[in-house]
Image (spheres, rainbow, N blue to C red):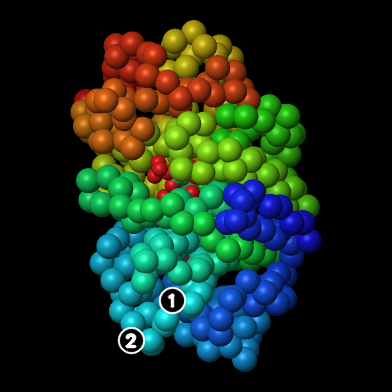
Amino acid sequence: MHTLDVALGARSYPIYIGQSLLEQDLLRRHIRASQALIVTNETIAPLYLDAVRQSLSGLDVNTLILPDGEQYKTLATLETIFDALLSQRHSRTTTLIALGGGVIGDMVGFAAACYQRGVDFLQVPTTLLAQVDSSVGGKTAVNHPRGKNMIGAFHQPRAVVIDTTVLNTLPERELSAGLAEVIKYGLIRDADFYQWLEVNMDGLVARDPALLSEAILQSCRNKAEVVAEDETEQGNRALLNLGHTFGHAIETATGYSDWLHGEAVGAGTMMAAQLSADLGWISEADVQRIGALAARAGLPLAPPPGVTAAQFRDLMALDKKVMDGRLRLVLLKAIGSAVVTDQFAAQALERLLEKMCQH
Ligand SMILES: NC(=O)c1ccc[n+]([C@@H]2O[C@H](COP(=O)([O-])OP(=O)(O)OC[C@H]3O[C@@H](n4cnc5c(N)ncnc54)[C@H](O)[C@@H]3O)[C@@H](O)[C@H]2O)c1
Ligand SMILES: O=C(O)C(=O)C[C@@H](O)[C@H](O)[C@H](O)COP(=O)(O)O
Ligand SMILES: [Zn+2]
């Protein structure tokens, strides 16, 4: 087992990464009182709920099984969680356990941030995307029909338990979606890791356990370092948004039900890379290189045909990085180096949208 630390002073917490960790007593170690609520969904419950429940035997544990899907990452579902907490009389010393992918993690984290003004929560991520990204760093949220992750809070978990064995049951498309966020770390800050991914992408897609474990470790290390420097995104944490301004627009335009988050980020990353090349910051050869890796990961390289340039313009104007009415984007200076900037001509973005989208 590997252990990383997210260094946030009094709110620091461990990330455990290893095989068959659900069966161990790691979760119990991070539950301060005797009460807990496991929140999961209808797909994950039959697979992993029993193992988690058994690891907590002797404690006063309730479970809540939600419907599965990004379209349920809403305030309405949050109410269901609060109803369960209140009807089962959970007090302020309870612990919420998020057993699932990023949708469950983001919602349960937000519920924990709000319930009785803040209770403990643990992340037990079961998708590759959640294991490499969403379970770490304390960004919690639900979507609004007008914008992705628009209602949320920063609330750090007490621990993250990553059992890599659960990836055996993950559908192929979900594995690819997770790889989009893995590639992101290489692109924004870790050229060595990017090269490692170029060597090992086929093995990752084939689910070689040692390679997956290494990719998760390096991704979590990168994310933990960024979060420790800038917990609430006053600066460089925004680099983790590479491809997301475009990607979130795709997700919102398609009603959170068409493309997976990682797929939208994959296409958005190609849009950010192309704009970086159009500005002369990286070469066309770099764009080809990024496209080749993303294609091997099984990711889309362009937005879905149904999303128009006008929709992109409209939705991107609501992005959380907008400052004083100016759009800021994460763009590449090289493979392994990114910036958050508003220093691009509006016409360059217009040309990109014309080239890559329908009108
Ligand atoms: N908070 C953050 O920092 C952060 C970072 C990245 C993404 N996100 C958010 O995460 C969400 C996407 O997360 P996701 O990609 O994990 O999607 P998801 O949570 O919808 O899970 C994907 C699918 O896989 C199923 N599943 C999960 N684990 C499984 C397993 N082990 N075996 C079989 N099926 C399994 C789920 O039931 C679901 O159908 C988005 O809402 C995104 O905005 C948040
Ligand atoms: O942790 C972060 O910071 C990220 O930006 C990680 C992203 O992969 C993630 O999708 C995040 O939810 C996006 O954040 P948002 O603030 O743009 O909603
Ligand atoms: Zn993301």
* Amino acid residing under circle 2: Ser
* Front one among 73 and 46: 73
Check the image and report above or below for 54 versus 203: below
Check the image and report above or below for 276 versus 30: above
Residue 86: horizontal and vertical position, in percent? 33, 82
Residue 189 - label: none
Disc 1 crowd rating (10 Å Cα; few below 14, some 14-19, many 20+) is: some
Residue 17: horizontal and vertical position, in percent? 71, 59
In which quadrant is the C terminus drawn? top left
Residue 35: horizontal and vertical position, in percent? 51, 83
Tell me which residue sits at (29%, 61%) in the image.
74
Tell me which residue sits at (31%, 30%) in the image.
322
User: Mark 1 highlights which residue?
Assistant: 92
Disc 2 crowd rating (10 Å Cα; few below 14, some 14-19, many 20+) is: few
User: Mark 2 highlights which residue?
Assistant: 87
Q: Secondary structure at mark 2?
A: helix
Q: Is residue 169 left or right of residue 148?
A: right
User: Farthest residue in the front direction?
Assistant: 10
Tell me which residue sits at (27%, 62%) in the image.
75
Give the quadrant of ligand 2.
Answer: top left
Residue 26: horizontal and vertical position, in percent? 69, 72
